[in-house]
Amino acid sequence: MKKSSLDSKLEYYAKDSAVVDKKNEVQYLYGGARVKYEGLELDADFIRFDNKSKIVFARGSTNDKGKYYGRPIFKTEGQGSSMADSLTYNLNAKNGVVHGVFTEQEGGFFSGGKTKMQPDNEFHVHGTTYSTCNLPHPHFGIFITKGIATEKHIITGPVYMKFEDIPMPLGLPFAFFPKPNKKASGFILPTPGEDATKGFSLLGGGYYMAFNDYMDARLVTNIYTNGSYDLNLVSNYTKRYKYNGNINLTYSSTRNGLEGTPEYAPIKTIMLGWTHSQSANARPGTTFSASVNAGSSRHNAVTAGNGSYDPNRFLQNTMSSSIAYGRVFGDGLFNFTSALTHSQQTQNRSISLTLPDVSLNMTTISPFDSKKRVGEAKWYQKLTVGYSMTAYNRVSTTEDVLFSKSGLNSFTNSVSHNVPISLPFTLFKYLNFSSSMNYNEKWDFKTLENRYIRTATGYEVRSDTVNGFKRGAQYSLSTSMSTKIYGIKQFRGNGSIRAMRHVMTPSIGFSYAPGFAAEKFGYYKTAEFYSDDIRPGMSKPTGEIVKDQYGKPLLYSVFMGGGPPQFRSGSVNFSMDNNVELKVRNRKDTTGTGERKLAVLQGLSFNTSYDLFRQNKKMSNIGFSGRSQFTEKLGINFSGAFSPYLVDLVPYTSGTGSSATTTYSYQEIDRYVWKDGKLPRLTTFTFSFDYSLNPEAFKKRNENLDKLNNQNPTVNRTQEQIEALNAVSRDPNAFVDFNIPWNFSFAYSFNYNNPLGRPETRSITNTLNFSGDFNLTPKWKIQYTSGYDFKAKNLSQTSFSIYRDLHCWDMSASWIPFGAYQSYSIDIRVRASVLQDLKLSKRKGFWTRY
């Protein structure tokens, strides 16, 4: 062969045969052919390569049954792989013609038609379909009659939608599709809906703002025909290896009722959400985090969870926030933390705000131990000393007065210092003792002065705050002893149970704290009656002392939030912890010698205490709790309490002289039950368990959730993906996995309460909640959640969901058939996020019927 006209190395291969025309310098490759030349990689059933013209041609073949196979799959330098029916490509001019192309671009697929590749990375297309369906013959798509595709955009002539090869009557004479290599701003299309109270609606419409690679924002609104509206601003920010977070601000104006009625007046609410997390390696030794959920208490109830109709949101009773900063210094000896916290009760609209809450903790040290010590420490070397300081600036009030003058003046502040000293030691090898002393000092910058006003039924207390520094100190002593007692029983023979072990851990302790009611300390003042006059400074003391139920002068603490104890206290505490385990034969072991442990009782504990200085009923209730894991799938938890006192009729006399009346009621009396030969009385008992018939479903769900959470934080997620991820976190059934054919789980709880052991004081509640799903067919899945309240004799909130896998589309329907929040919704949408606005939704809610 004469000198080759090739400029670069040519690699070619064929499974069937390769024919070389030396005269014309043409290679013919048959059956599983492959060519690599100057950045071009080409696989096909037949390839013809012309060395002189540098033109390559490839096609597939047709078998005896008429099926076309071995389509060309090609990849050029800097481009992804594509599939075609046939192609012709000029390696010199870097252009070619492709018939029936199928290629992926930015999450979508181009298929069919004719494509001409240009040397400047331009593609001229004719009769091509763009779709997010990954089939060579897609279920739906945008049909492009002709167009030009570049690296950054696509410009087309007439385009229209096709569903199952049926053209839709709506189209565009021309179109422009940007192909940015980064996030781009744009409009968000709303979803139509209907509400029984607010009327028709457009939900979720707005504008998306892509500021840069580290921050974006989304401003959306919900608009209703009765005049209600919601504004929602969501911003996500992230910096790799540093921090990431999310800000969510919502303002709502809600109208309920008919125009002209009082209910039609707008209810304006606001909500603020902020989450921030810092990477552990960003600033070693320093942490900063935020989790804010604050706003109007009625927001979720009034707006139905901001139009989401999520029961977990509009049934929320509490809101809380925390912004925390922490730092470790002094070679790890000291740990400083500071936090701004808040909590709200949505029912009574109460709010508690702490600005800030500061703590400084020192790691315990052993002042008498030596770093050079060798061997076991002496008893005095085990003594440890610690230190902690806490300070707060706090207010508890209601929403409507928080930011008023009186609300801002209601802040209380305090500093507490605590020094714990402990000394553990062992006697007789088996008795473990621990002695400790705690010294606490409290600094307050406001004190109380109480005025007692006499009323018809007794008195009421009116408190005045006085600015000024006040110091209070207290201390306490305690010691405890514990040991372990083991009992083991071996079983002979070939039975399933090989051995049983019972471990008992008894513990007894003593504690003592002196009282600080003496006048010399100045911690308490004598309560005194004042005249009833609401004018400032006009309520004067009457000279009459307030007395308690025992006829002694009543004292009150001058410290806000409590101070040193008024009375001395001392108690003896006793507890007994039990663990019972069985060693059983492992039936999965084919050798017959394998064994495994089975926990029969875990943490079965009993505890009680005896107050040495209390006037009556010195012994507390006998509490117990425990848990048991019968199988790997089923575990139970239980707890309760026994009362050691008798119940009897106790007389109560009201009035004097001839108008005196005596009534009798059952009450606990100061007499132990065993003095009358009885056992302690059960007053409370709780029992619960949960079980999943197919635990693989929850395991699979958690694995998928972990994968989503462990994604690179710079991966861009749409707001719909973020909301779906949050839904999975809240609800185990929110993740739809068609690979798991069925699942059923249930949870049962039982509560018994009878403080006096009488039929009229007995209260019993037991509920059963269950949820699950099943595949009706490989493409249909049905989910359900419900429960039953045995006391109310009624079903709890019940919901049904249906999912249909439509390959490149999803259909979902949810239905709450009865109750205060009955509603339904139907959604059909494209799976791919690039066409997330291509959807059809129907919603109707009945959450605020009037």
Image: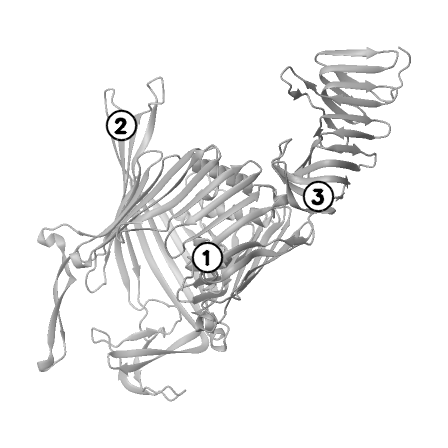
**Residue in front for this viewpoint, 850 or 458:** 850
Q: Position of residue 88 (x, y in %)?
A: 79, 26
Q: Position of residue 452 (x, y in %)?
A: 31, 80
Name the residue that disc number 2 marks: 499
Question: Mark 2 is on which residue type?
Answer: Ala
Q: Tell me: 94 left or right of 490.
A: right
Marks 3/1: CA–CA distance = 75 Å
Screen quadrant of the N terminus: top right
Determine if residue 594 is in view: yes
In the displayed structure, would residue 667 be above or below residue 524?
A: above
- Say whether disc 2 or disc 1 marks the residue closer to the N-terminus: 1
Q: Position of residue 274 (x, y in %)?
A: 55, 57
Name the residue that disc number 3 marks: 159
**Residue in front for this viewpoint, 653 or 192:** 192
Name the residue that disc number 1 marks: 387
Q: Tell me: 503 left or right of 102.
A: left
Q: Dot 3, crowdedness within 10 Å: few (<14), some or many (≥20)?
A: many
In the displayed structure, would residue 538 be above or below residue 197?
A: below
Q: Dot 2, crowdedness within 10 Å: few (<14), some or many (≥20)?
A: some
Q: Which residue is located at x 21 percent, y 73 percent?
A: 549
Describe the element under mark 2 as helix, strand or loop.
strand
Residue depth check, mark 3 versus mark 1: number of the one nearer the observer: 3
Give the residue at the far right of this rendering.
2
Question: Mark 1 is on which residue type?
Answer: Tyr
Q: Which residue is located at x 37 percent, y 74 percent?
A: 558
Question: Mark 3 is on which residue type?
Answer: Val
Describe the element under mark 3 as helix, strand or loop.
strand
Q: Position of residue 705 (x, y in %)?
A: 51, 41
- Say whether disc 3 or disc 1 marks the residue closer to the N-terminus: 3
